[in-house]
Image (spheres, rainbow, N blue to C red):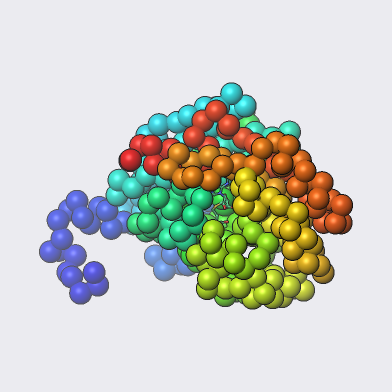
Amino acid sequence: MHFMSLNSLKPSIIKRMKQAIYDLSFEDLENYLVAVGSKKFHAKQIFKWLYEKRIDDFALMSDLSHNLIAKLKEDFTIPSLELVTKQVASDGTVKYLFKLFDGSLIESVLMVFDYGYSACLSTQVGCNMGCTFCASGLFKKRRDLTVGEIVLEVLTMQKYLDEEGERLGNLVLMGTGEPFDNYDNVMKALGIINHPYALEIGARHISISTCGLVPMIYRFADEDVQYNLAISLHASNDELRSSLMPIAKAYSLNELFGALKYYSQKHHRRLTFEYLLLAGINDQEKNADELKQLMQGINGYINLIPYNNVKEKDFRSSSNKATLHFYDLLKKRGIAVTLRQKKGDDIDAACGQLRADYEG
Ligand code: SAH
């Protein structure tokens, strides 16, 4: 775009080229303010307007000068997500289908637990990881979500909760997409969400889930952040994992656990291992034995996840009996294990399922 003269663009295009204010970190905003001859400290006011008071009009920023408001209007938009549809489950889980500026559809989910509200965020439009059991992969990745779009998922659901006087206190990046395949935008968005003048969701209340992009785990390990890390394990040996998750062909369990040990040395934080229970596939005694070997010396626990059946896929969830049996097998082997509460059972709760229904 830089080689085009702005004058040659149609006004509508110029309008769209304005940046979404939600793309800016606190530091970006400070730098912008200095660059336009204003003062750094206005960043705090602007952040509070956007994220604490949650207003969506620059004109309402009443402690800023008219000049600064005019400048902000000239350079930025305050966009919103368009709600296409939502599904409400009997346990209070709400799944939202949002439309982005280019027509792309994404899902975000709001869940209520005894410790408060938690949101599940998407990080990409579609997903390229190709896990065989997952509905998200029914659509190849169209694009990464921008920083502002990830921020907006959280802000939008918080606005819904404002109507009930409630607060969104926890985030899991377990919706559509692979967070570590959109690393920079995800980390920047979380920095905004976590900021003390923004939504202030504590880092320890934010979990990033990855299918295991090993180089990115090393990169994440080197960051000075306290987010929780969850690994989609789902299998106890390389052969089984490769048959379920193409990423396992690129990185062996040995390489994956090498990266996780590096992370653990640096952070001393407990890792979560997500393990979907697929009937007859990964819920046998042999799998428990192999998991015991894998987990040796690892500061982490296995979270057993009931599989949400996806109608386009042949996999079936392990029965309740088989699930409890597998839980016991792990316990007996001294592995720290939890059983995930099933949420949104009576709606299309599997990642990507609502979008699949809508577009399919
Ligand atoms: N790409 C990331 C995050 C998104 S998937 C990752 O792989 O971790 C979030 C979690 O939901 C992963 O553990 C994924 O394997 C799991 N998942 C996918 N399809 C599911 C389904 N139908 N039922 C239950 N969990 C599912």
Q: In this rendering, would 316 be left or right of 62?
A: right
Q: Residue at x 80, y 52 (%)?
A: 330
Q: In which quadrant of the rendered image does the N terminus lie?
A: bottom left
Q: How many marks?
A: 0
Q: In this rendering, would 85 be left or right of 9?
A: right
Q: How far from the left and from the top, in percent, is residue 128? A: 43, 60
Q: In this rendering, would 259 be left or right of 82?
A: right
Q: How far from the left and from the top, in percent, is residue 71? A: 35, 55
Q: Residue at x 19, y 51 (%)?
A: 12
Q: In this rendering, would 110 be left or right of 265?
A: left
Q: In which quadrant of the rendered image does the C terminus lie?
A: top left
* 175 over 287 or under it: above or below: above
Q: Residue at x 48, y 41 (%)?
A: 310
* 255 over 210 or under it: above or below: below
Q: Quadrant of residue 272?
A: bottom right
Q: How far from the left and from the top, in percent, is residue 52? A: 57, 43
